[in-house]
Image (cartoon, rainbow, N blue to C red):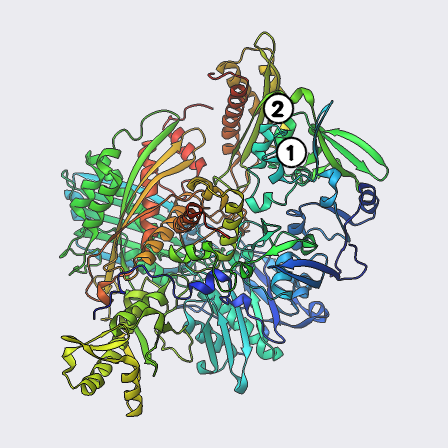
Amino acid sequence: MKAPLYLRPRSLQEALEALGEPGARPLAGGTDLVLLMRDRLVRPSLLVDISCLEELRRVERDADGLRIGAACRLVDLEAHPLVPPVLRSACRQVGTPQVRNVATVGGNVCNASPAGDTIPPLLSLDAVAEVRSAAGSRSVPLDRFFLGPKKTVLAPGELVVEFRIPGAALGRGGCFQKIGRRSEVVIAQVNAAATVELDERGALAAVRVALGSVAPTPLRCRLAEEKLTGRPPAGEAVEEAARAVLESISPISDVRAPASYRLRVAAVLTRRALAGALREVGVKDL
Amino acid sequence: MSGAGDRVWLNMVVNGRPVQVSVRPDARLIDVLRDDLGLTGTKEGCSRGECGACTVLLDGEAVNSCLVLALKAEGREVLTIEGLARDGQLHPLQEAFLRHGAVQCGYCTPGMILAAKALLDRHPHPTREEIRRGLSGNLCRCTGYKKIVDAVEEVARGGVRP
Amino acid sequence: MSATVVGQSVPRLAGRDLVTGRAVYTADMRWPGMLYARTKRSDYAHALIKRIEVEEAARLPGVAAVLTAEDIPGENSMGIIIMDHQLLARERVRYRGENLALVVGDKEVLDEALELIRVEYEPLPVVLDPLEALAEGAPRIHERGNLTWECHLVKGDVEAAFARCDVVVEGTYRTGFQEHAYLEPEAVVAVPEAGGRVTIYCGCQTPFHIRSIVARALGVPFTSVRVVQATTGGSFGGKDEVDAEMGALAALAALRTGRPVMINHTREEAVMGASVRHAAIIRHRTGATRDGRILARDVDVVLDGGAYSSLSPFVAVKALAHSAGPYDVPNVRARVRVAYTNKTYAGACRGFGVPQVTFAAERQMDELARELGMDRMELRLKNAVRVGSSTAFGQVLRAGVGLEETIRQAAAVAGWKERRAGTGSGGRVRRGIGMACMMQGVSNGAEGVDAVGAFCQLAPDGSVLVGCGLADMGQGANTVFAQIASQILGVPLERVRVRAVDTDHTPDSGPTVASRATTMGGRAVAMAAEKARDKVVEMAASMLEVAPADLDLRDGMVVVKDAPDRAVPLAQVVNALYWTGQPINFEAWSKAPDARFDEQTHQGDIYVEFGYGTHVMEVEVDTETGKVTILRHVAAHDVGKAINRQAVEGQIEGGSLMGIGLGLLEEIKYDERGNLLNPNFTDYLVPTSADAPDTEPVIVEDPGAWGPFGAKGVGEFPVSAAAAALANAVSDALGVPVRQLPVSPEYVLDLLSSQGQEPRA
C-alpha cells in the first residue's frame, strides 16, 4: 500500500491549503487517526500535522470570552487555570495519561464519538466551533456540530481551529460526571455535564444539561433545562429535570452497556451533575 | 518536513544519541524503535493505547509509541527502557521494581517503569492513590499492581533520583 | 544444609534483563531473511466453506506464499483427547475468526494480501447458548454431536441424605468467558534447520505438546522438531493450543519458503483466536441439618466449551472433583457436561474449572448460612475439610490440610467479627463483607501420569546449572528452582543458573499447568541436586578424610561440621570428580503416585497434594449506579511452604486480581451472529492499578508430604476465592443473592429492582 505524504505546515494558511487536497486529513495528536489507519478504515494520501501550529495551541481570554485552540492537548487543559473546571475534569478522564499527553480537544470533538468526554462540558458552556478552510470561515455552535456517530457538519477541507466559550458561560457553576465499567481508562457508558447560575432572586438561570453516550450524538437536554430555569434550586426541580432527560435521550444497547442501564444512569448522572454545579454556586443541600 | 516519496528522513535523539532514519510517513514510533533501531525493550501489547506496554518518554512525557506517528518525534528526545540505566547503573525505579518483586513476566515492565518515571518527574511525592491513578494507563496481568505501587512509592519517598 | 535460601524473598533470577528491556521475547527475535505470516480468519461463526481464492493475494509483490488446508502435508488437527481442531479450516468453520489461510511474506504487505483473499461461504445456523446446543434437535456443530464431554461423581446416597436435611438451598449460577489477557500476545518463530529439522521459538508452557502437534502437521518424526521456550510474557493456561497451531503454521511456512517465519498475534487475534476460560451454568443444591452440618450437595454443571474440545475433558473433571467445595460432605452427586458452541474455544485458564464451581459452592454456603441464621464463618469452620476428611471424590486427606487455619487467620486479619456488623443496611451506598474458601488439587491428578525430569550440572568452577521440563512463564518458577538447588548444594544463589525449556535438552515432563511447577518440578530439581550433593560429599569425604555424614555444604564450600576450619571449595571437589572420570551431571526423575479412581463415580485418590485458601473482602455498592468498590481484601493461602515468600505474595496478589476481574469486570461478549464484540483492551476491560485493591496476602504453611520442603503450589488458587468472596460481599451489601459473574452494574441494579429496593430513578 502506498504511504501517505506527511506535511508539517509552517502556517495555518499553508495547512488549510493542503487540507483542500483530496485525500488530505488533519493530524493532531493522532490517537484516533493512527488507529483508523492501522485498522485500514481510512487511507489518507496526505497527513497535515496541525499539532505544531502555535495559533491552534493557545488558551486565551478576550473580551468575548475564552478561546481554546483546537490543538490544545488534554494534558494542558486539565490543569489550565483559565479553563472552566467542568471541562478540566472531563479532560482528566479521557483515556490514559499517555493518551492525554498527545490527544487534543479538537480531536476529541471532531472524532464525534457519542461518548466523547469533552463534548458535554463544551456543550454546557455554549461552546462555538470556529471552522476555517482555504475558502473562508464560519462559526458553528457545538450543539449543531454533530450529525451522527462519527459525523459532523465539517466539509472536506474544513478544520476546527478553536472553540469559543462566551464570557457569560464562564461564571457558571459546572460539574462533569462520567460512569464507565472501570474507574479509570474507560469509554463512558454515560457522561453528563451541567452548568448553572443563580439570578439576583436566587432562582436558577442559564441552566445547561448535556449528556453523552445516550443518543447518536452528544446532546443538550433542553427539556430538562426548561424544567429548571426560573425555579428555586431545590431537589424537586432537579428530580423533574432528571426525569425530563429520559424523554430527550434514545440510548442503544452495545458492548459497553444495555440501553436500560444507560437510561437509569442518565438520570442519576444528571442529578449528580446538577448537584455538583449547584454546589459551585453555593447551593450545598438540595 | 515534507516528503515526496514513500519514505522520508526522521531526525531525533534516542536515549541521548542523535539518530537519522528513513521512515514511511505512516510508520508508528514503536515500529521505528523496534524494527529500524532494534530497541525491542519497547513492547507491543494492544496496539490501541490501552495497555501502556509500548510507553516511551517523548521530551520527558509518557506516550504510547503505538499511537504516535514516528515523524512526531522529529527534532525531539525519545527515552526508551534501554536508555534508563546509565553506565550499567540501574535507575532507582529499576532497582525498586526488582527488590519489591514488582516484575513477574516482565512484559509490562519497561512501559510501567517509564510511566512511573514520568509520573515522579512531574509529581515527585505522589500519594498511593495518585500513583495508582498515574499508572492506570499501564496494564499488568501478573502482579495485581500492589508490588508495583510499593516500588514506586518507595522511590518517591526516597527522593533520590538522577 | 545451613544456607537459608529457601523461605526467603529472592528477586527474580533474570530480573535485571526484564527491567532493562534486554530480555528477548519471541516477537523481539530478528533472524536474517525472516518473513512474517498472518492468517485469514473466517467472517462467519458457523458456515460451510465453498471456495477460498488465494491467487490474487499470492501474486501481490512481497508475498512469498499463501497456504490453505490443502498445503498441510500431515495431520490438519490438534487437541488433547479429541483431535477435533483444524489448524486451517477445511470445509467448515465453527467460530468467527477461525483460521482459513496463511499469508507469508514481508511484514508490510500482509494486511493487504489478506484483503485479497476471497472466501465463499454457505452460512449455517449459529448456536451460541450451551443449553440450546445440548437440547434435542439443535444444529450439529461437530459430527459427534454437541456434547464435548460428560462426567459424573457419586459419593454416598444424595437423595436419602436430602430427605434427612432440615434445610435445603438451591440456586443456578452463571459465569462468563474470561480472557487470559497476558500482556504479551502470542508469537512464534519457526526456523528451518539442517537435515530437515525445524526449531520453534515461542513463549509457552507446554513445549512437548507443541512439538507433537507441529510434527504431526508436518508429517515428520517428533524429533525433527525442536521447541525452545523464549522469555514468556505471561500465559495463565493460555499459551498452549494456540502456540501449537501457530507453531505448526509457521513451521509449514518456514519449510515451504526456506526462511525463518514469525507469526505474531495482534491483541484482537489473541482474544478471538486463542482459548478462553469456560463459561458455566451451575445448578447447585445443598442440604444441611439445623445445626449447620452439610449432609448433601447436588451439582449439575454445563460448561460452554466453544467450538473445539481443547482441554475441555480435563477441565470438566477438575470442575467435577471440586464442585462441592472444600468441605467434608458425606453425600455428593455431580455431573459436568461440556457443550460445543460457535464461539472461540475454551481451554485451560488459571483455575481450570475450579473458579466457576467454587463461586457456586461458596454462594450456596452463604445462602445456607442465611437460611440457618448462622454466621458464615462458623458454617464454614463446621464443615471445612481437616486431616482425615474425605473429599467429594472420596480421597482421604492425610496431612497438610491448612484450610481451617486460613479461615481463622483471614478472619482475624480482616476483623470479620467486628466488620460484619452493620453491613447491608442503609442508604445510597451500602457496605458488605464476604468470605470464601477454596481448595484445589495440585498437579495433573486425573489427567494422567504425573512425572518430571530434572538435571543438575556441576561446573568445575563450582557454579551450578539446573533445569527441568517445566517452564517459567513469568510466575518465577526458575527462581524457585535455583533457590532449591542453592539450598541443597550450599552454593550462593548468584552461582546457580536455570536452563530454559528446550525439547532437545530438557526431559519431557508434561505441561507446566495445575500449579505444579514448584511442587513437581521443584521436587525433581531437589532430587537431582541431592544426587549431586551425595556425589560431592562422597568425594569430599575422601579428600578431607572424614565420614560423609560429617560434612556440610555452605557458601560454596564443603565443610567439616565440627571443624569449620577444615573445608574444601566445592570447585575443587568438582574438579576432583571430573579428573577422576566421575559424573558431574545428575539426572532425577520424580513420579507422583498414579491417580486411582473409578471412572464412573470419580471416587478414589486423584491428587497428590492440595492447596487451601480463604479470602475476606469488603465492598461498597452504589445502589444508584450499581458500581462496586472494593474496600479491603485479605487473602490467606496454605501453600505448604513458601520457598520464595515474595513470589508467593505476588501469586496471591496477581491471582486475586484475576479473580476480581472475573468477578467484577471481565466477560467476552458476542452478538447474535457470533461476532466477538470486545476483542481488544478498549472493551474487554481488565482491572487497572486504579481498580485494584491492596490485597493483603496471608501465608499459612502447613507442609504437604510430597513437594520440596513441604511446598504445595499456589499459582491458580487465589482466582476462585477472590471471585467468590467478591460475590458474597456484594450479596451481603445488597441483601440479595448474587448468582452471576461478573457482577456488572446493570446486574446489581436488576437485583435491587427485583427486590423493590431500588432507591430512585
Residue C8, above or below C738: below
Report crowding for label 1: few under 14, some 14 to 19, many 20 or more residues within 10 A (C-alpha).
many
Instruction: Label 2: state its secondary structure.
Output: loop
Residue C431 found in image quarter = top left
Instruction: In this rendered view, identify the residue nearer to me: B151 or C143.
Output: B151
> Which quarter of the figure has residue C64?
bottom right
Q: Is residue C363 above or below residue C251?
A: above
User: What residue is disc 2 on?
Assistant: A221
Name the spot of residue B135 as percent of width and height, x first. 49, 46
Left or right placement of residue B88 versus residue C708 in this view: right
Query: x and y percent of residue B68 in the render?
Result: 64, 52
Amino acid type of the residue tagged 1 in the rendering: Thr
Three-letter amino acid code of the residue under disc 2: Cys
Q: Is residue C225 above or below residue C163?
A: below
Residue drawn at 71 percent across, 44 percent down: A51
Numbered-mark total = 2
Q: Is residue A185 left or right of residue C638?
A: right
Vertical placement of A219 versus B100: above or below?
A: above
| Left or right, C615 with reference to C126 | left
Quadrant where the N terminus of chain C is found in the figure: bottom left
Residue, disc 1: A217
Give me the residue at 48% from left, 75% from top.
C214
Name the secondary structure under disc 1.
loop
